Image: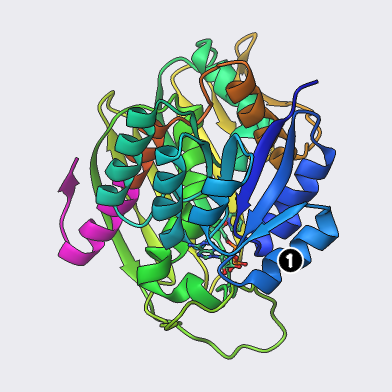
């Protein structure tokens, strides 16, 4: 079977611990070239995963490597320049979440992708989890009636990543844009991606650069002038054109219990997404139906999906229009927190 030839951009944590192991198992895509600002990191990954070519810059890889598409796994502020350069070179683009660090850059990616006529896919693995897939389809098929409310929490007690993640100009923000986006997207996707209309939110940074012992963290590489100027908590509400509302919270550090869950509420039934339990009524009684769904390799699923979309000219599950809308939501959350007022989208 024909395999999509991928140029990997970024050889850090997510590339080497999630994407590259998934490509090793993937039947329709293969990584043939890799680049990182730190060449030694790219070389190490190339050796470990048997990638034949290593480049010094994205531009050089786009010019010389025989690739169909790129997989962008850089710091968040690298997503836009790399995705735009790739689209301009006629390459299809898969990009790690979040799309980028501002809605102006999101629009620039959209413009480049549309002008080049290439496929774009925002890699959010949650959309490929069996529970989210099942519930999204149930909502779309009307099993929940009108979904008018949802809430999502991604709360770490002490889990602030190191390196570039806490540098606002490199990351675009803290837990809201880093992990909150997973929960917000899960709810939004299952709700059927309604059009957002207004956002009210707050952020805080009362814990900051803690020295707590006995806790682990995700290690990001240091960016050129690493600052610690991101929030460590964000919370708020997102309203949609269809009248529905989504309440969210996300923290890297808080003095409370860590938990992660998403719930949706419809006129006929509701669901706890994390446990795949559907709350409804049967024979006039309350019913709690727990659906048994095995966990799957969501990274392998998203990569296989992207390759299938390019090879067989199908629409991607997270196209550029939706990625831009999500960026507008994230930007509105930060604007609302800063301006202390509701933001109309
Ligand atoms: N889907 C998920 O669950 C998930 C989890 C973690 C991280 N991520 C995302 O993956 C991306 C990378 O995160 P990470 O944890 O791997 O970070 P990392 O710091 O471990 O790796 C990033 C790598 O990108 C390289 N890089 C930065 N800018 C570049 C550029 N312009 N050209 C080439 N290389 C460049 C850096 O040198 C570094 O090696 C981020 O966007 C992050 O949000 C997603």
Q: Reply above or below: 7 against 202.
A: above
Disc 1 is placed on an element classified as helix
Whether residue 331 is in magenta: the answer is yes
- Residue 266 location in percent, x, y? 46, 23
- Residue 272 location in percent, x, y? 60, 36
User: What is the magenta range?
Assistant: 328-345
| Quadrant of the drawing holding the N terminus | top right
Q: Which residue is mark 1?
A: 43
Whether residue 136 is in magenta: the answer is no
- Residue 234 location in percent, x, y? 39, 62
Are there few (<14), some (14-19), or many (20+) residues within 10 Å of tag 1?
A: many
Count of marks overlaid on the render: 1
Q: Say left or right for 62 vs 78.
A: right
Residue located 34% across and 51% down the image:
330
39 or 230, which lies in front?
39
Q: Reply above or below: 204 against 270.
A: below
Q: Is residue 218 visible?
A: no
Q: What's the colour scheme?
A: rainbow
Q: Chief secondary structure of the magenta span? A: helix
- Which quadrant of the structure image shows residue 12? bottom right
Q: Say left or right for 113 vs 292.
A: left
Q: Say left or right for 301 vs 176.
A: right
150 or 107, which lies in front?
107
Rendering quadrant holding ligand 1:
bottom right
- Which quadrant of the structure image shows residue 110? top left
């Amino acid at each position: 079977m024909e395999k999509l030839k991928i140029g990997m951009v970024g050889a850090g944590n997510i590339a080497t611990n999630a994407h590259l192991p998934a490509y090793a198992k993937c039947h329709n895509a293969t990584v043939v070239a890799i680049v990182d600002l730190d060449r030694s990191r790219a070389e190490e990954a190339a050796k470990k995963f048997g990638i034949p070519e290593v480049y010094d810059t994205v531009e050089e890889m786009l010019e010389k490597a025989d690739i169909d598409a790129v997989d962008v796994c850089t710091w968040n502020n690298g997503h836009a320049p790399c995705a735009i350069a790739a689209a301009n070179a006629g390459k299809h683009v898969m990009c790690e979440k979040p799309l980028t660090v501002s809605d102006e850059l999101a629009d620039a990616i959209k413009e480049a992708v549309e002008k080049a006529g290439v496929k774009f896919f925002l890699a959010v693995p949650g959309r490929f989890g069996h529970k989210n897939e099942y519930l999204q389809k149930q909502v779309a098929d009307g099993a929940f009636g009108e979904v008018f409310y949802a809430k999502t929490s991604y709360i770490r007690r002490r889990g602030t990543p190191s390196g570039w993640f806490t540098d606002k100009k490199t990351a675009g923000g803290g837990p809201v844009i880093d992990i909150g986006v997973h929960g917000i997207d899960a709810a939004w996707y299952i709700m059927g991606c309604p059009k957002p209309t207004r956002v009210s939110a707050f952020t805080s940074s009362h814990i900051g650069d803690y020295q707590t012992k006995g806790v682990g963290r995700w290690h990001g590489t240091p960016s050129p002038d690493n600052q610690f100027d991101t929030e460590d908590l964000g919370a708020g509400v997102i309203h949609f054109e269809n009248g529905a509302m989504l309440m969210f919270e996300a923290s890297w550090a808080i003095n409370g219990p860590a938990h992660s869950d998403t719930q949706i509420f419809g006129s006929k039934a509701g669901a706890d997404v994390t446990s795949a339990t559907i709350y409804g009524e049967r024979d006039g009684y309350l019913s709690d139906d727990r659906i048994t769904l095995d966990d799957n390799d969501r990274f392998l699923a998203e990569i296989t999906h992207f390759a299938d979309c390019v090879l067989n000219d199908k629409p991607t599950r997270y196209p550029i229009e939706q990625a831009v809308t999500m960026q507008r939501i994230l930007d509105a959350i930060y604007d609302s927190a800063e301006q202390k007022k509701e933001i109309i989208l």
